[in-house]
Image (cartoon, rainbow, N blue to C red):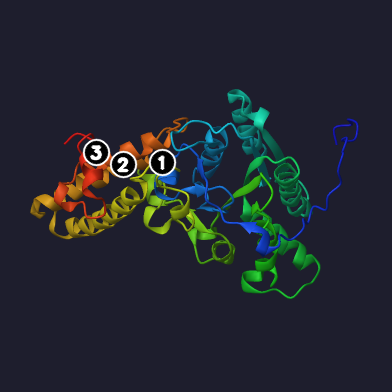
Amino acid sequence: MDDSPKPFATRRMNINGVPINPTSREYPRDFIQTGVSAIDGLNTLVRGQKLPIFSGSGMPHNLLARQIVRQAKLVDAEGDATGEEFVIVFAAMGIKHDDAEFFRRGFEETGTLNNVVMFLNLADDPSIERLITTRCALTTAEYLAFHEDIHVLVILTDITNYAEALREIASAREEVPSRKGYPGYMYSDLASLYERTGRIRGSKGSITQIPILTMPNDDINHPIPDLTGYITEGQLVLSREMNGNGIYPPFNVPRSLSRLMKDGIGEGKTRADHSNLQSQLYAAYANVQSVRSLASVIGEEELSEIDRNYLEFGESFERSFLGQGIDEDRSIGETLDVGWQSLSHLPETELHRVNEEEINEYYAAAGL
């Protein structure tokens, strides 16, 4: 396309990949720090995991994707870089020219581009190229991980554009449509992308994947997010309400989860109090939703003192823990400390998910 010489290749690989033998897979256990508290603290990303982000039209998922690319790193239990090679493979399908320039310029300005393999398929490019772009990116990741022993984080955006291209091509081939006009094999097609993620015994490298998709009409039961949720190990859901309240990143905490988080956190990986703190934050924030519903009926002035404490916690949790700057890179230690600071708005008698030693060490240090 640019009239340059053809790329020099030392190895030729099929872009459809080779299925990984399930018995040779190694269980994901190592923490990846994204610098985003809502991910690192509540829904931790583990090396070898596939963890999608469910967004909506007009939501700041591009900002979040850029921030993760710029900040993601491999760290040890002390928060220091492990020294292992780590590369980002970034693939964008069907994006506008200004979005492509946004990503390219953002990576260049911070020097991140030196550590990124970038694939761009623009909105005015042929639909068939959306299917090829994704597979080329994943093939590159497989080469780097399993032939060069590098740890690779793959970010794919937007899977919805990929699925729309799949439907368009299936329709042109006059294939029998299934739900909402998508081909009946869309589940296996998406699985052929997502399952190219993981770790293999005997290989030092790994592939971790963050697919990003915009839910049509914010419907999480739409075939694209629905099928994606079946294949992947959790999901990070963005909230339009939180976005309207000016909170970035606007995560919907109750609907987000990371199914492999429990094996990638704790002593020797992040911090010993991480698991209990995450459980306590979830429990307290669930109570906040109930108190807010009650306050909308009887008014805040009629609430008990404990209920008002929960409202204070909810405000601090959303503004200080979930909310952070688009260039703010928090270590896992800083994330957990901010979580304890939010819990300091609650009396000690309300902390049922953390143990006494953790309360004495971290709750007191948070200001009480």
Query: With respect to residue 187, does 154 lie above or below?
Result: above
Upstream in the sequence, badge 3 or badge 1? 1
Q: Quadrant of the N terminus?
A: top right
| Residue type beneath disc 2 | Gly
Upstream in the sequence, badge 2 or badge 3? 2
Residue that label 1 marks: 37
Q: Quadrant of residue 149?
A: top right
Task: Look at discs 3 and 1 and give the one toward the viewer.
Answer: 3
State how far apart marks 3 and 1 are (Cα): 21 Å
State how far apart marks 2 and 3 are (Cα): 14 Å
Q: Quadrant of the C terminus?
A: top left
Q: Quadrant of residue 296?
A: bottom left
Residue lying at 62% horizontally and 38% vertically, measured from the top left: 99
- Secondary structure found at label 1: helix
Residue 320 visible, this angle: no
Q: Nearer the viewer, residue 161 or 205?
A: 205
Disc 3 crowd, CA 10 A, few/some/many (<14, 14-19, 20+): few
Residue that label 3 marks: 361
Residue lying at 77% horizontally and 55% vertically, measured from the top left: 17
State how far apart marks 1 and 2 are (Cα): 9 Å
| Residue type beneath disc 1 | Ser
Residue lying at 53% horizontally and 34% vertically, measured from the top left: 71
Q: Quadrant of residue 188?
A: bottom right
User: What numbered label is drawn on residue 339?
Assistant: 2
- Secondary structure found at label 2: helix
Upstream in the sequence, badge 1 or badge 2? 1
